[in-house]
Image (cartoon, rainbow, N blue to C red):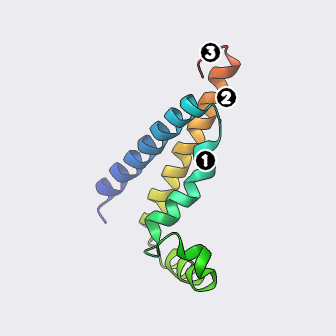
Amino acid sequence: MNIAILLISMLLFFVLFYGIGFLLNMLLRMTWIMAIAYPIVAILIIDDVPFIQYFRNSGDSFSQLGTKITSLAPADILILSSGLAGAIFAGITMRILRQKGYRMF
């Protein structure tokens, strides 16, 4: 993967999940909702197994997920990590805004 594409992808994932986390925090007033929900979103991005299979056939589904996670390229790990960082920074931003007195947040 080209370094420019990697940097742009990392920036896009950061901004995307920062924005989603910020909006969810404003609407639901739960500071860390996106940071908690991000692993589920990442699993849906990584794995091809339908989500219901994690409950119906959990042993096989989690073993396939483990195989997929260990076979990720370093670029994919960096991109997904930047999305998690965006979700965490959205929570930090909300906490700071609430401490500063913005009741809307």
Cβ atoms at labels 2 and 3 below 8 Å apart: no
Q: Earlier in the sequence, mark 1 or mark 3?
A: 1
Q: Where 64 sits versus 13, above or below?
A: below
The mark found on residue 102 in the picture is: 3
- Position of the C terminus by quadrant: top right
Query: Circle 3: is it few (<14), some (14-19), or many (20+) Cα within 10 Å?
Result: few
Residue drawn at the location 43% of the way across and 74% of the way down = 48
Near-viewer residue (73 or 56): 56
Residue type of the residue flagged with mark 3: Tyr
Near-viewer residue (37 or 27): 27
Q: Where 10 sits versus 77, above or below?
A: above
- Position of the N terminus by quadrant: bottom left
Q: Position of residue 56 (x, y in %)?
A: 59, 79
- Residue position for label 1: 35
Residue drawn at the location 50% of the way across and 57% of the way down = 41
Residue type of the residue flagged with mark 1: Ala
**Alpha carbons under labels 2 and 3: distance apart:** 10 Å
- Residue position for label 2: 95
Q: Earlier in the sequence, mark 2 or mark 1?
A: 1
**Alpha carbons under labels 1 and 3: distance apart:** 21 Å
Per the image, label 3 sits on a secondary structure element best described as: loop
Residue drawn at the location 62% of the way across and 15% of the way down = 102
- Report which quarter residue 19 is drawn in: top left
Residue drawn at the location 67% of the way across and 28% of the way down = 95
Near-viewer residue (3 or 69): 69
Per the image, label 2 sits on a secondary structure element best described as: helix
Q: Where 67 sits versus 14, above or below?
A: below
Q: Position of residue 66 (x, y in %)?
A: 57, 79
Query: Circle 2: is it few (<14), some (14-19), or many (20+) Cα within 10 Å?
Result: some
Query: Circle 1: is it few (<14), some (14-19), or many (20+) Cα within 10 Å?
Result: many
